[in-house]
Image (cartoon, rainbow, N blue to C red):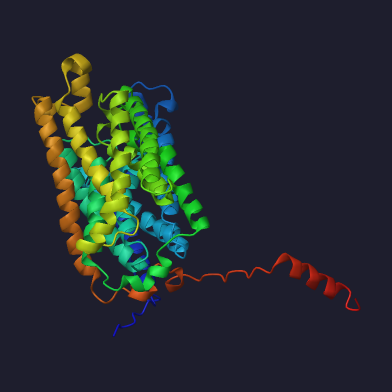
Amino acid sequence: MMCCKNTNIRISLPAVCFVWQIAMIVLFGVFIRYDEESDVRKWIEFKVSHNITSDIENDFYFRYPSFQDVHVMIFVGFGFLMTFLKRYSFGGVGFNFLIASFGVQWALLMQGWFHALDPDTGKISIGVESLINADFCVASSLIAYGALLGKVSPVQLMVVTLFGVTLFAVEEYIILSLLHCRDAGGSMVIHAFGGYYGLAISWVLYRPNLNQSKRLSGSTYHSDVFAMIGTLFLWMFWPSFNSAITDHGSGQHRAAINTYIALASSVLTTVAISSMSDKRGKLDMVHIQNATLAGGVAMGTAAEFMITPYGSLIVGFCCGIISTFGYLFVTPMMEKYLKLQDTCGIHNLHAVPGMLGGFIGAIVAAAATEEVYGREGLIETFDFEGDFASRTVLTQGGFQAAGTCVSIAFGVVGGVVVGLILRLPIWGDPSDDNCYDDEAYWEVPEEEESIPPVLEYNNHMTRKHPDM
């Protein structure tokens, strides 16, 4: 006998939103200030001290186009990518909107405490680059949401984000600052971590009777078109995502080129494998919506390295194949044998390509030579300065690989702990026969009944001339 769960979140959701938002206001008041490029007094002093004559040299004009692109990916790209379920589009876009809006605030604080806290004043200075990094941080929680889509309440999603952003800030600090890894587009810190974090939570929250909601777990013609909008936004702006916080100059230029090429390559192999896998050669929209993006994920770490244009093509080529095979074979096997239900297939789009991207970055770093990069180029690309001035490229490669393992460990262990917290019966999550349905948490307008056009015409005539 199955107990029917109560999805009434009238007290819990407003409580979480109000209390956490008030906490953000207090914490921002205590810690967060404008940096020298966004504070009017400091900027004027900065211009004088650095002999700058024009406001156009403000970092805002350099970073804001990238920020806009990344911001669109987070709110439009990720949101619409999750609208493929036939009765869960409100939840896909709406809850994405909610957790991203909370997540960016918490990320500004968490990342600020680790990376931008002034030891003298105890304040965090934020500028346009902080906004980009906060979006990156939130991306990992949105990736985790993909594995849980349709099976959790918005209150649970807020908890996932609270812990996800916290864990992200810690693993990012370990990987980028302590291990001194380079990970411009976040294959390791964003995709591998977010993917394994979501998978671990989903594994702990396994629903043995989820087949009771089977009728709603698929897509319709229109929902797949909406999801494809998300795919195209992500696909178009991914070069910005991978290059947004790279060094001014050739690093950013190269990261955009490498990502652009890898993405184009993964589309062709995705289409090829999708067609081959069907007896009549027909394409599966699931593959086209997801695996076509795998090249961008896997290119994240190595994007700013001298991987060469054909190297980028190879990465995209292989990842399109690996990701599509994942949707065809690995996801069904994981559900059957590992008891792991992954709604969006984040294992094939984020976890595995992210892990591969981390190891690709390690190989490309270890293979770097002075004759390709130049002495100055090696120092610039891998930041061999200060405490790390004596590091060799081989050592750097080893640390890059270690960083990938750290991100996976954080994702898995953190996800299991958070999953156990989410199993408490207080969160208003849906019952097994009530998943993938917006009705649980949204006011859903009734579908308009379509009247065949002929009848409509006749009715219209009847009303006009009752004597006819």
Q: Quadrant of the C terminus?
A: bottom right
Task: Evaluate whether residue 38 shows in this view.
Answer: no
Given the current orientation, which residue lies at the most extreme front position?
Answer: 279
Given the current orientation, which residue lies at the most extreme bottom position?
Answer: 1
Residue 29 percent across, percent down from the top left = 32, 54
Depth order, front residue of 281/73: 281
Given the current orientation, which residue lies at the most extreme right position?
Answer: 467
Depth order, front residue of 328/209: 328
Relative horizontal placement of residue 420, taking residue 12 as reference (left or right):
left
Tell me which residue sits at (50%, 71%) in the image: 443
Total numbered labels placed on residues in the image: 0
Relative horizontal placement of residue 271, taking residue 363 as reference (left or right):
right
Depth order, front residue of 386/418: 418
Image vertical order of residue 264 relative to residue 141, above or below: above
Q: Quadrant of the N terminus?
A: bottom left
Task: Evaluate whether residue 278 shows in this view.
Answer: yes
Residue 101 percent across, percent down from the top left = 39, 55
Image vertical order of residue 133 relative to residue 339, above or below: above
Residue 9 percent across, percent down from the top left = 38, 75
Tell me which residue sits at (28%, 36%) in the image: 318
Relative horizontal placement of residue 193, taking residue 437 as reference (left or right):
left
Image vertical order of residue 94 relative to residue 47, above or below: below
Residue 283 percent across, percent down from the top left = 43, 47
Tell me which residue sits at (42%, 50%) in the image: 284
Quarter of the rendering containing residue 65: top left
Depth order, front residue of 154/280: 280
